[in-house]
Image (cartoon, grey):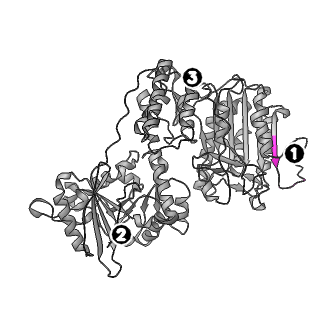
């Protein structure tokens, strides 16, 4: 199917904001040679090849050389907060145009919601004035008095996307530009130079950003019509260019484009366009009254941990294909509601936002708010004439588990104080504790006793809470006399064995730990960013800093040799990573395509299945036993849930 867009774009109806910041007032250390020249190259392409009138290209530059003469005949302003926001939110909306083009070259950051923050030239440490790009795009996506204007919007950002938590000396604050219901007829295409968390490379020898340099080679080959109509092709080509550069060791960033619909209104999922002919009439969008009431319900509310479940269920219940990116849209609950309302289901007469809100209400621990949301869903559904909404599914119950906590004795080596709890249906029940420190052999005996006593509980997993020094103990291979007639059986073949290290989650590492777990719950267990594979070549002094820089990854699959194992575990704990898998005693096998391939084969990695999957992999097949082959290397699994910790009184 063709991806062509609007035919015959009139350059006289194209307007642009082009920004390039090389010099910032905050510090000379922020100097970024090439950003202003990159912006000038974009402006020249727009006015020369594309044919856009000079007066319709707003050029804002901050060159390093104050006497810069590389823009003859071109008037430009300083990219201050006042100038950018006046042009972007007052002057441009008043123009009668069809296509808005925004380009920005300079420094960039992302906040906890993955929103891109672009500091102005007059930003300071105490008040880091910036453009919140995603918030600005939500504003431009919204319906306004001039609904027929700027139905097509293209945004290109050649800037880093560094986590704001790594810029602790800056004070960004929150920035919004007013909430307006989205206009489903407005199409936006956003192209970033790098993924969230990455640095966009600057080519000092060329005085240019590597991304813009590659982009200009593509744009210079095409007219305005061709470039706009084939933006997806241009973006794919750029990604292929950078894939080749990374293989050659000449680049590190991953250009990313974001689009929910093409210019004709077709929805994009992955690499394919859906066929509008096969789509039904679609569900009605929320009306102005619904948005006003919903805004009051969501004002100031944080995104709960079960939001991803609600988001996913909205697509399931309306027969709408789940977005390829899988993660939540940035910007909080209101932004998620806007995203859902812009998509809409095709097989049921039901706006996606209604089941999303119903699910949030069903899981909420605030009855008053949940009742208000349910009332809003009911009245909105009746007014819009949408289909009834079934009850949301109950959350999957957590299987019963035995928690075993071992604490090193302060006076004698090799012995530990022991406590045990049963966790079932959200409640911890203390079942046993030692009156004196025990040897590891004695711990095995006491564990066997409790497993036999609690055999009717239906225990599925055993979670060992350990000091750092016991992470190398192979608990999953412990053989205990709990089988028929006292037969010894291996724990890991009958229980999910999870290792935990909560006593190491202190200081800043504890903050990272809780933050990553919340991201895991909010984004679901199949988000591709959740898992990061490591090999020996990845282990170094900066590994812990790299792993904690952003919420993902929440799981590390460490295929490392024994000599790098302790450094890897240190980095995992320093970064607060809650889930990790590593080979026992450095038994690395490199006969396949990585640990994910061996764990799940061709399927997508689902972290929720990891404990059960590890148990299944530990059970050898009869064929394996017959020929004596070791097809599956022994692996350890850390699964450290900060929300599953029993209350502990001090040891007497």
Q: Is residue 29 visible?
A: yes
Q: Is residue 312 visible?
A: no
User: 562 or 79: nearer the eye?
Assistant: 79
Q: Is residue 40 magenta?
A: no
Tell me how far mark 3 sits from mark 2, CA to CA: 57 Å
**Which label was assigned to residue 71?**
1
User: For the residues carrying marks 2 and 1, which lies nearer the camera in this image?
Assistant: 2
Mark 3 and mark 1 lie on one chain; the one further toward the N terminus is 1
Residue at (45, 49) in percent of width and height: 520
| Residue 620 place in picture, x, y as percent | 23, 57
Q: Which residue is mark 2?
A: 650
Residue 465 vs residue 495: left or right?
right
Residue extent of the magenta highlight:
59-67
- Label 3 secondary element: loop
Residue at (76, 55) in percent of width and height: 206
Residue at (58, 30) in percent of width and height: 261
Residue at (46, 54) in percent of width and height: 554
| Residue 137 place in picture, x, y as percent | 66, 36
Residue 225 vs residue 63: left or right?
left
Quarter of image, res 423: bottom left
| Residue 527 place in picture, x, y as percent | 46, 46
Mark 2 and mark 1 lie on one chain; the one further toward the N terminus is 1
């Amino acid at each position: 199917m063709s991806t062509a867009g609007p035919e015959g774009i009139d350059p006289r109806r194209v307007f642009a904001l082009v920004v390039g910041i090389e010099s910032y007032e905050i510090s000379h250390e922020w100097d970024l040679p090439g950003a202003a020249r990159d912006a000038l190259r974009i402006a020249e392409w727009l006015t020369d090849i594309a044919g856009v009138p000079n007066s319709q290209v707003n050029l804002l530059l901050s060159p390093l050389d104050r006497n810069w003469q590389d823009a003859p005949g071109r008037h430009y302003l300083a990219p201050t907060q006042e100038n950018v926001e006046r042009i972007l939110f007052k002057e441009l909306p008043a123009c009668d145009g069809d296509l808005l083009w925004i380009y920005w070259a300079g420094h960039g950051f992302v906040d906890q919601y993955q929103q891109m923050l672009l500091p102005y030239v007059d930003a300071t440490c105490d008040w880091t004035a910036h453009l919140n790009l995603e918030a600005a795009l939500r504003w431009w996506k919204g319906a306004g008095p001039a609904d027929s204007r700027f139905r097509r919007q293209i945004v290109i950002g050649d800037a880093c996307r560094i986590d704001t938590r790594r810029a602790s000396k800056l004070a960004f604050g929150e920035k919004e530009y007013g909430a307006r219901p989205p206009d489903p007829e407005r199409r936006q295409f956003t192209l970033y130079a790098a993924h969230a968390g990455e640095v966009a490379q600057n080519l000092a020898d060329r005085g240019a950003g590597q991304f813009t340099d590659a982009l200009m080679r593509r744009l210079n080959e095409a007219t305005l019509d061709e470039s706009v109509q084939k933006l997806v092709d241009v973006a794919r080509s750029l990604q292929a260019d950078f894939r080749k550069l990374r293989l050659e060791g000449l680049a590190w960033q991953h250009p990313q484009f974001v689009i929910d619909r093409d210019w004709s209104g077709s929805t994009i999922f992955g690499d394919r366009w859906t066929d509008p002919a096969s789509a039904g009439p679609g569900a009605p969008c929320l009306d102005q009254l619904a948005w006003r009431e919903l805004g009051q319900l969501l004002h100031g509310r944080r995104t709960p941990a079960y939001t991803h479940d609600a988001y996913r269920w909205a697509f399931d219940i309306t027969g709408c294909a789940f977005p390829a990116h899988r993660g939540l849209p940035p910007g909080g609950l209101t932004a998620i509601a806007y995203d859902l309302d812009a998509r809409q289901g095709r097989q049921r007469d039901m706006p996606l936002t209604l089941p999303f809100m119903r699910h949030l209400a069903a899981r909420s621990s605030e009855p008053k708010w949940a009742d208000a949301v349910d009332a809003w869903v009911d009245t909105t559904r009746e007014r819009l004439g949408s289909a009834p909404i079934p009850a949301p599914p109950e959350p999957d119950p957590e299987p019963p588990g035995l928690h075993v906590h071992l604490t090193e004795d302060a006076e004698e080596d090799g012995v530990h104080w022991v406590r045990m709890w049963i966790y079932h249906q959200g409640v911890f029940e203390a079942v046993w504790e030692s009156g004196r420190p025990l040897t590891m052999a004695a711990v095995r005996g006491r564990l066997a006793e409790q497993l036999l006593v609690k055999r009717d509980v239906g225990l599925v997993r055993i979670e060992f809470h350990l000091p750092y020094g016991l992470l190398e103990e192979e608990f999953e291979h412990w053989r205990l006399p709990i089988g028929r007639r006292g037969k010894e059986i291996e724990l890991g073949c009958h229980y999910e064995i999870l290792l935990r290290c909560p006593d190491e989650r202190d200081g800043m590492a504890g903050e990272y730990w809780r933050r990553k777990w919340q991201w895991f719950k909010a984004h679901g267990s199949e988000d591709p960013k959740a898992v990061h594979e490591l090999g020996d070549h990845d282990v170094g002094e900066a590994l812990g800093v790299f792993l904690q820089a952003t919420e993902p990854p929440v799981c590390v699959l460490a295929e490392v040799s024994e000599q790098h194992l302790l450094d890897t575990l240190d980095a995992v704990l320093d970064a607060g990573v809650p889930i990790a898998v590593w080979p026992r005693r450095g038994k690395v096998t490199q006969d396949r395509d990585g640990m994910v391939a061996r764990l799940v084969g061709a399927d997508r990695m689902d972290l929720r299945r990891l404990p059960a999957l590890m148990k299944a992999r530990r059970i050898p097949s009869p064929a394996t036993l017959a020929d004596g082959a070791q097809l599956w290397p022994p692996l350890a699994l850390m699964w450290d849930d900060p929300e599953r910790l029993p209350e502990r009184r001090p040891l007497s």
